[in-house]
């Protein structure tokens, strides 16, 4: 049986073997230790051109059929048999591909976690421009909030993404300045 995978949209160094694709998916789910959604997996392995989209879908279905992974409302997660396969066969997939996919997955999951606390709302302003409302929230309690006028939607979206990524640093600097506590922002500014 031919085990060659479709390679359209796969970068040089990406996976072109169906078995390697299944092993990579088991490895990722095992290494992450938490569920990951289908869209997040697509972003990690297809968006980074490591695997062809159709091959990933086929591999996921095969792993589900073999009861190596499961899918629920939180996404895909590994089952004990899948963990064992990931442990035994992880070296079949190159260390570079494994490390890259894992790093991308962690970044995506961290970003999703930040989006739950660091919220943004973009709304048009009468007369032109956009209001970017940024807030840090915890269990329906707003810890920090600020509104910024932005000249256009693209700059508002970019600034919003930066707030999601760096909201804690922004909050710490503003709090340090308003409470006259330079130690709260000095290290941040020196590292930049």
Image (cartoon, helix red, strand yellow):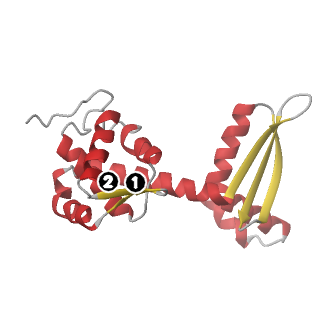
Q: Residues within 10 Å of mark 2 (few under 14, many from 20)?
A: few
Measured from the top left, where is residue 100 in percent x and y? 34, 49
Task: Name the residue: 24% across, 45% down.
Answer: 21
Q: Secondary structure at mark 2?
A: helix
Toward the viewer: 157 or 192?
A: 157
Asked whether the residues under the numbered discs 1 and 2 touch, taking CB atoms below 8 Å apart as contact, a structural biologist would say yes
Q: Quadrant of residue 58?
A: top left
Residue furthest to the front:
65
Task: Name the residue: 16% across, 63% down.
Answer: 88
Measured from the top left, where is residue 81 in percent x and y? 23, 64
Toward the viewer: 65 or 147?
A: 65
Q: Quadrant of residue 116?
A: bottom right
Residue at which label 1 appears:
103
- The answer to whether residue 175 is left or right of residue 187 is right
Q: CA distance from mark 1 to mark 2?
A: 6 Å
Task: Name the residue: 81% across, 65% down.
Answer: 177
Residue 129 seen in the figure: yes
Q: Quadrant of residue 138?
A: bottom right
Residue at which label 2 appears:
99
Q: Looking at the image, is 80 positioned above or below residue 74?
A: below
Q: Quadrant of the C terminus?
A: bottom right
Q: Quadrant of the N terminus?
A: top left
């Amino acid at each position: 049986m031919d085990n060659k995978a479709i390679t359209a949209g796969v970068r040089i160094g990406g996976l072109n073997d169906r078995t390697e694709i299944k092993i990579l998916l088991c490895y990722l789910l095992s290494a992450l230790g938490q569920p990951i959604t289908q869209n997040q997996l697509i972003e990690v392995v297809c968006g980074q051109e490591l695997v062809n989209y159709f091959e990933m879908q086929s591999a996921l279905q095969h792993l589900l059929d073999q009861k190596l992974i499961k899918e629920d409302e939180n996404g895909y997660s590994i089952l004990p048999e899948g963990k064992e396969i990931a442990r035994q066969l992880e070296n079949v997939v190159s260390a570079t591909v494994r490390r890259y996919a894992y790093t991308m997955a962690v970044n995506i999951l961290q970003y999703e976690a930040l989006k739950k606390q660091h919220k943004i709302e973009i709304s048009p302003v009468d007369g032109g421009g956009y209001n970017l409302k940024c807030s840090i929230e915890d269990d329906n309690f707003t810890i920090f909030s600020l509104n910024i006028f932005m000249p256009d939607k693209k700059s508002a979206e970019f600034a919003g993404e930066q707030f999601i990524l760096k909201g804690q640093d922004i909050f710490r600097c503003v709090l340090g300045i308003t409470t006259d506590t330079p130690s709260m922002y000095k290290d941040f500014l020196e590292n930049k």
